[in-house]
Image: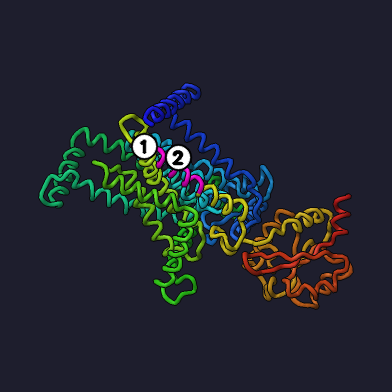
Amino acid sequence: MSSRSDALRSRLDRGLRLLRQRTGLPPSVAAVLFVTVVSLLLRLVGLGGRVAHFDEGRVAYWTVRYAETGVFSYQYIIHGPFVQHVNRVVFELFGRNDVTMRLVTAVVGGLLPAVVLLLRDRLRPVEQVLAAGFLAFNPVLVYYSRFFRSTVPVAAFMLLSLVFLVRAVDRGSPLALYGTALFAALGFAAKENAVVYLLCYLGAGALLLDYHLMDPPSADRGSDVVRGRLRAAYATLTSSAGRRWTGYWLGHGVLAVGVVAATTLFFYAPRDPNGLGLWSSLVTPTRFPTLIDATVADIERGMEYWFGHAGGTKCYKDTLIAGYQCFLERTLGVLGRFAGPLTILAVVGFLAERYATDRPRPLVMLASYWGFVSVLGYPLGTDIFGAWIVVNALVPLAIPAGVGLGVIVRWGYDSLSTTAQPTRAVVAGVVLLLVASQVAVTANTGVYTRPTADTNQLVQYAQPADDFRPAIRDLGTVAPHNDGTDVLFYGSELVVEGEGGGLIPECTVMVRTLPLHWYLQVARADGDCARNPTELDQKLGDDPPPVVLVHEDRRSVVAQRLDGYEAETYRLRTLGRPVTFFVDQSAVANASAA
């Protein structure tokens, strides 16, 4: 057995040397880059396969309106404006469809594993590869990287911000400090909960500081240690060299704050070609104070909204505690089903780092504290449950998970010698196989084969259960050749009684008809509404619109008025909201032949 172990270890070593010769890179770097390529492929393949979720449709709709009108203002209900600005460019370059809608989020999520390359000073080579693997292959991260939502971008940007801060400390690099500022600002531009990330960093940093103040113990009381450290720091900073160092970094710190302010202003400032806007204010500097005031006011309203009501009751429970328990149980359910290995190994990595090493590494401890408190905190802070909140915990927990699995891998690798027990290598191999199998199986069912099923815990209830896009394609075919209304909504289930539904056509009930508004924009179709049978008869007339949408309960009433139309019913939510599409196939055929 020992000779076989030696031979296997020898082959592994030769393979690593060959990899370095072929790539010219350290094996860990080459492996992380390979993992990142696979990560991108996993997020890009079949990217447009799932019909748009309510949230996706709403944000995509406003992005198209921004692209068409040039008018933009921060709307906190759809979170940060980063994706709107970026996707406006994407839509103009590559068109508007479900693939281009999700492309930016997919690329950001796909590149996330490469971030660990910036932590080479803090993580061992095998830990880098394994942490990258968790970021690349976890089903929750894959699913929501294929979802037009800002959860993955804010997690990625805030992780990058922290990583650049670590590099600024390690390397003494002002450029890294600017990277910290830029990505922190991008995180806030992506989603308002970037502020929560900063609070997590401060809390975790306070725990680390408390630990290191007494490591190693140098006095009988902690207060003596604190006073000693403060005296030493004061003496250093007030020396001539210390003053120069302080002035140098203070200057760069001020400029970094300027980067944050400029980036935030760029993304949050309103745009209006005929009124107050960023570009017009740059041309007319006297308007700049007004622009800043308007931008700050918008941000304040958004922050008051999101942080003012997030702690309300949940799950229709009577008390905050009961609601929190409900959301926490759902969170733990998602973790157990789709991130069990990552979560367990993160605990292993934390315990190994905290209690099995002489000096726990601050990065590993900080990421652990950050991740664990996110598991407990986000169910309290969110107003509507979605498995996307788990992303905020899984991104930091990937670091201690890589450490935990690294302990097992090294344990098995070190056993491949004549003086150790080779059975350890078998155990380590089995653990790796189990982790990979669990990830592969849950990713296949949760991400690719059942991405809209109500029984899939990754699916939020506002996801349409049925794919109605064949009807939308027919609408897109006939709309360019139709002079009047392209699609007519009918019935109180879909149409508001008064005015101002919010999205075009404004007569629709937005919360019941999204994401249809996005698909009307994709088809470049004009919509209208009929509120009662009299209006329905008037608007159908002798030349009815090529597409009519009604709630399923009104299907028989409308069918009597639409001879020759084909009808299909689709659910606009995981359960319920059945809407029947009546499509004039003769109009579609004529438009196709034109």
Asked whether 283 or 569 is in front, the reply is 569
Which color scheme is applied?
rainbow
Mark 1 or mark 2, which is nearer to you?
1
* Residue 205 locus on image (x, y percent): 30, 49
* Residue 118 locus on image (x, y percent): 41, 36
Q: Residue at x 68, y 76 (%)?
A: 497
Can you tell which quarter of the image residue 251 is in?
top left
* Residue 282 locus on image (x, y percent): 53, 46
Can you tell which quarter of the image residue 10 is in?
top left
Q: Is residue 120 above or below residue 366?
A: above
The answer to whether marks 1 and 2 mark residues whose Cβ atoms lie closer than 8 Å is no
Asked which secondary structure carries label 2, the reply is helix
Q: Is residue 246 above or below residue 322?
A: above
Disc ID at residue 34: none
Q: Amino acid at mark 1?
A: Arg
Region rendered in magenta: 425-437
Task: State yes or no: residue 416 in magenta.
Answer: no
Task: State yes or no: residue 429 in magenta.
Answer: yes
Q: Residues within 10 Å of mark 2 (few under 14, many from 20)?
A: many
Identify the residue position indicated by label 2 in the image. Answer: 115
Q: Is residue 411 above or below residue 221?
A: above
Q: Give the main secondary structure of the magenta stretch.
A: helix
Asked whether 214 or 9 is in front, the reply is 9
Whether residue 268 is visible to the viewer of this picture, yes or no, is no
Identify the residue position indicated by label 1 in the image. Answer: 410
Q: Amino acid at mark 2?
A: Val
* Residue 361 locus on image (x, y percent): 30, 42
Q: Quadrant of the N terminus?
A: top left
Q: Residue at x 60, y 46 (%)?
A: 103
Question: What's the CA distance linking mark 1 and mark 2?
Answer: 23 Å
Asked whether 335 or 293 is in front, the reply is 335
